[in-house]
Amino acid sequence: MNKITAQTLYEEKKKDFSFEIITGEEHLHKRFITSCDIFRPGLALAGYTGYFLSERIMIIGKTETSYIKTLNENIKAKRIANVMKLGTPCVIVTKKLKIDERFIDEANKRKIPILRTPLSTTPFIHALSTYLDYKLAPTTYVHGTLMDIYGVGVLFLGKPGIGKSECALDLVERGHRLVADDLVKIVRRGEMLVGMGAEKSDKLKHHLEIRGVGIVDIFRIFGVKAVRLRKRIEIVIELVYWEDTKGNYERLGLKKKTKNILGVKIPYIKLPLTPGKNISVIAEVVAMNYLLKLRGINVAKEYNDELRRVIFKKEIPSVHFDEDIE
């Protein structure tokens, strides 16, 4: 399970959310966030604490602060204590609202940091949820090359030295875009997979290792049009040596094969390699064929249906020209 600390949230989004620390700065690095969902303690402040998820960040907005002001001092102290003792990674107050001192006292007792932002509650929740969804998303790493071909994210897999980087270089020269090579980081976003480079430094991104040549900087050679930072993965092409296939490869394209990555099934093609085969052109055709399928056009099925119709009806194909005369 992925997790981040409240310290990471504060440091990475301090500028975007204009965060300020009300209390608990020394505890930020000890509080772990494991859920992208948030919690608004309206019902809990009203007295119902039967269903409370302590791993969620607590958001206090205008509704909560206004309700607290309606309570008498004894009930107010009891309700706030009951909410805070349930636990939360951190508390965030929106709209730059002034928070009741009892929240601060209870937070200090339980070592819970409290942050404040000037943003309105609803837009802030959307932005925070999007950020947490990205940071806490299931992640994996694969050895391969990710390309953007005609707007289709194509992930090339295969044994080291089989030609993934060389294929990517040819595709870039043909006008397509490199996303990542060698080590591809894959993040699941809902039912989508998003791929990107795993390099820790931006200066290391968008390089290809061409055997016999060395490291090639795609960005500097081909320009900004030849690279992109991330791309949704829509097709997986595995390059295999012809002798390793043992005849086990698709001939007609009628069978739909998929590869499971992080629980998401992605269309999968096993492409056998032989001397002289132009892999980059085939990859372009695969991408364009995928775009046709998105529009409901399945060429393999249409061809098979027409062939079966002709065979079973025993029709003689019509002759359009008796002679080829121009």
Image (spheres, grey):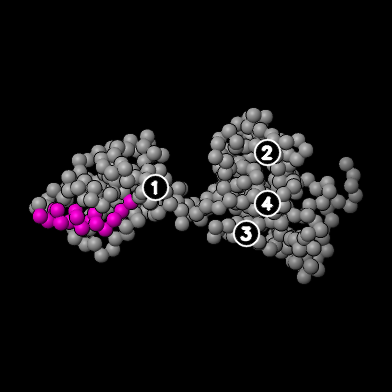
Q: Earlier in the sequence, mark 2 or mark 4?
A: 4
Q: Which residue is mark 3?
A: 259
Mark 1 or mark 4: name the one nearer the start of the chain: 1
Q: Quadrant of residue 306?
A: bottom right
Front-lying residue, 36 or 20: 20
Percent x, y of residue 135:
45, 48
Q: Main secondary structure of the magenta part?
A: helix
Could you say which is closer to the camera, residue 263 or residue 232?
263
Q: Nearer the viewer, residue 298 or 18?
A: 18
What segment is highlighted magenta in the picture? 74-89
Residue drawn at x 24%, y 49% is 107
Q: What is the CA distance from the residue labelled 1 to the residue labelled 2? A: 34 Å
Residue beneath disc 2 = 208
The kind of residue on which mark 2 rests is Leu
Closer to viewer: mark 4 or mark 3:
4
- In the displayed structure, does residue 149 sit left or right of residue 7? right
Tag 2 secondary structure:
strand
Q: Is residue 289 left or right of residue 275?
A: left
The answer to whether the residues at label 1 and label 4 have Cβ atoms under 8 Å apart is no
**Within the magenta stretch, is there residue 32?**
no
Q: Above or below — where is 122 with respect to 242?
A: above
* Dot 1 or dot 2, earlier in sequence: 1
The disc, 3 or 2, on the residue closer to the chain's N-terminal end is: 2
The disc, 4 or 3, on the residue closer to the chain's N-terminal end is: 4
Image coordinates of residue 26 in percent, x first then y, are 31, 43
- Point out the frontmost of discs 1 and 2: 1
- Element type at marker 4? strand
Residue that mark 1 sits on: 5
